[in-house]
Image (tube, rainbow, N blue to C red):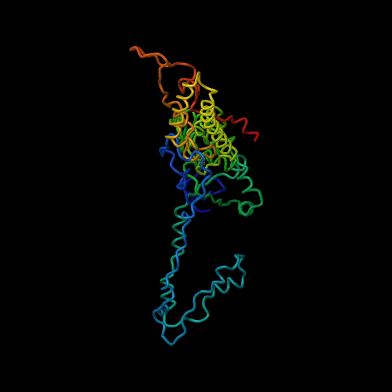
């Protein structure tokens, strides 16, 4: 085996070759609006049907320029004009199915060309040929190679067990030669080393404090290689040492927390994270590529849409009751409150909108705060003169706070135990 970059077990039979190390992790999708974009208090899109991508959004294929086939290519250097032009390589070979090379084909490749080309063209083409071996060497240099023990991997991870003992090509090589290389792609180097040291019981080399992002990376690795039981031993230590609290607004860190809380089975943290996601997300939930189960995302979006629908229906229902005199202590009371509510609904483009999900760019928390900040009118009782003292009309319908009651701007979080059975 080639020399390892990191040695966890000097007698290890396995080299893990990590390609494309430290690739971007949990990146926010550019197609979705940023979480910090301000949302209007009563957005016009409240009742808009799920938006389709506009026809103009699809990039049109550029037309080929007319000049593509104007003049034939110049003759290569060293080729006489009366000699036949060198042919382009056949495209049939490019599309031929890959398969094992036969002995005859290998002999043809090693023997070289049957005839020498004319006038040194071969020398120039060889000089101009792309340096494929150099590219391969550069890719190899960028790889991280970690020497580990096959036995430790097999005992702790069902995925490594299948690779080394499941009849795959790596397992055949391992059984025949006693050593093997296993490729991995795009993992964070530090997170992978932490997980592998845990599998090798090297607790003295494992940090006792991780950042939220590093903890999420380790959890993704443990989930992928199916070795949660081994990583669980240190999970509580890492979580208790975290500096990052669960955010109170929808953000990338909130989704990292949601993933960590779900994977390490932290019911209180999971409930708090899902409550914030439902209350303060203004669109669909972006998992950031984290392996959060679809049932969690569906449950978050369904409850968010349901709570927004309920609140909009409540607003419309109170307006209808004021109009029909089912609310209000009298004609003046219901009329004045109806007019104030209708006016503010109209100003905020909510008057003619219906409660239709998925409510793009609408946060439930902001909607509640907007209802709580509705301005209530003030008027005096009929037949009474103003005598210098406030004689404002007061009844159980005279303010919007009394009409709507106490509204909580936070939706209750999800119960992880209930989701386990979905």
Q: Quadrant of residue 262?
A: top right
Q: Position of residue 374 (x, y in %)?
A: 43, 27
For the residue pair 327 and 233, the one nearer the viewer reads as: 327
Taking 333 as reference, is 288 above or below it?
Answer: below
Q: Position of residue 344 (x, y in %)?
A: 43, 31
- Tell how many labels: 0
Taking 81 as reference, is 334 above or below it?
Answer: above
- Residue 299 visible here: yes
Residue placed furthest toward the front: 383
Taking 330 as reference, is 176 above or below it?
Answer: below
Q: Is residue 18 left or right of residue 389?
A: right
Q: Quadrant of residue 302?
A: top right
Q: Position of residue 269 (x, y in %)?
A: 52, 29
- Residue 271 visible here: no
Residue at the (56%, 28%) spot, across then down: 267
Taking 177 as reference, is 257 above or below it?
Answer: above
Residue at the (61%, 52%) spot, across then down: 170
Residue placed furthest toward the bottom: 82
Q: Is residue 268 left or right of residue 247?
A: right
Residue at the (56%, 52%) spot, across then down: 181
For the residue pair 326 and 216, the one nearer the viewer reads as: 326
For the residue pair 71 and 359, the one nearer the viewer reads as: 359
């Amino acid at each position: 085996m080639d020399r390892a970059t990191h040695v966890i077990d000097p007698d290890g039979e396995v080299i893990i070759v990590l390609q494309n190390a430290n690739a971007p992790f949990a990146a926010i999708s550019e197609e979705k609006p940023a979480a910090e974009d301000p949302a209007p208090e009563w957005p016009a899109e409240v009742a808009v049907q799920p938006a389709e991508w506009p026809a103009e959004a699809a990039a049109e294929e550029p037309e080929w320029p007319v000049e593509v086939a104007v003049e034939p290519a110049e003759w290569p250097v060293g080729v006489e004009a009366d000699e036949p032009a060198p042919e382009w390589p056949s495209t049939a070979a490019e599309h031929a199915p890959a398969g094992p090379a036969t002995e005859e084909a290998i002999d043809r490749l090693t023997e070289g060309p049957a005839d020498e080309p004319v006038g040194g063209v071969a020398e120039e083409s060889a000089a101009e040929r792309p340096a494929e071996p150099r590219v391969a060497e550069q890719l190899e240099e960028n790889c991280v190679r970690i020497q580990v023990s096959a036995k430790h991997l097999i005992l702790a991870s069902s995925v490594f067990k299948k690779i080394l003992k499941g009849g795959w090509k790596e397992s055949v090589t391992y059984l025949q030669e006693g050593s093997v290389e296993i490729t991995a792609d795009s993992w964070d180097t530090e997170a992978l080393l932490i997980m592998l040291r845990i599998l090798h019981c090297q607790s003295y080399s494992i940090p006792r404090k991780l950042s939220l992002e590093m903890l999420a990376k380790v959890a993704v690795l443990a989930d992928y290689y199916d070795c949660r039981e081994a990583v669980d031993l240190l999970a509580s230590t890492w979580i208790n040492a975290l500096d990052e609290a669960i955010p109170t607004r929808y953000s990338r860190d909130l989704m990292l927390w949601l993933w960590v809380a779900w994977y390490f089975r932290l019911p209180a943290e999971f409930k708090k994270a899902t409550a914030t996601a439902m209350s303060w997300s203004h669109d669909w939930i972006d998992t950031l590529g984290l392996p959060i189960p679809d049932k969690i995302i569906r449950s978050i979006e369904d409850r968010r849409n349901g709570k927004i629908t309920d609140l909009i229906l409540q607003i419309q229902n109170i307006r209808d009751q004021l109009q029909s005199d089912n609310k209000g202590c009298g004609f003046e009371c219901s009329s004045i409150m109806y007019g104030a509510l209708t006016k503010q609904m109209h100003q905020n483009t909510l008057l003619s909108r219906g409660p239709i999900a998925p409510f793009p760019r609408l946060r439930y928390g902001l909607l509640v705060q907007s209802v709580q900040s509705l301005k209530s009118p003030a008027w005096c009782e009929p037949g009474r003169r103003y005598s210098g003292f406030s004689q404002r009309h007061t009844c159980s319908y005279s303010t919007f706070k009394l009409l709507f009651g106490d509204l909580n701007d936070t939706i209750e979080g999800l119960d992880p135990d209930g989701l386990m059975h979905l």
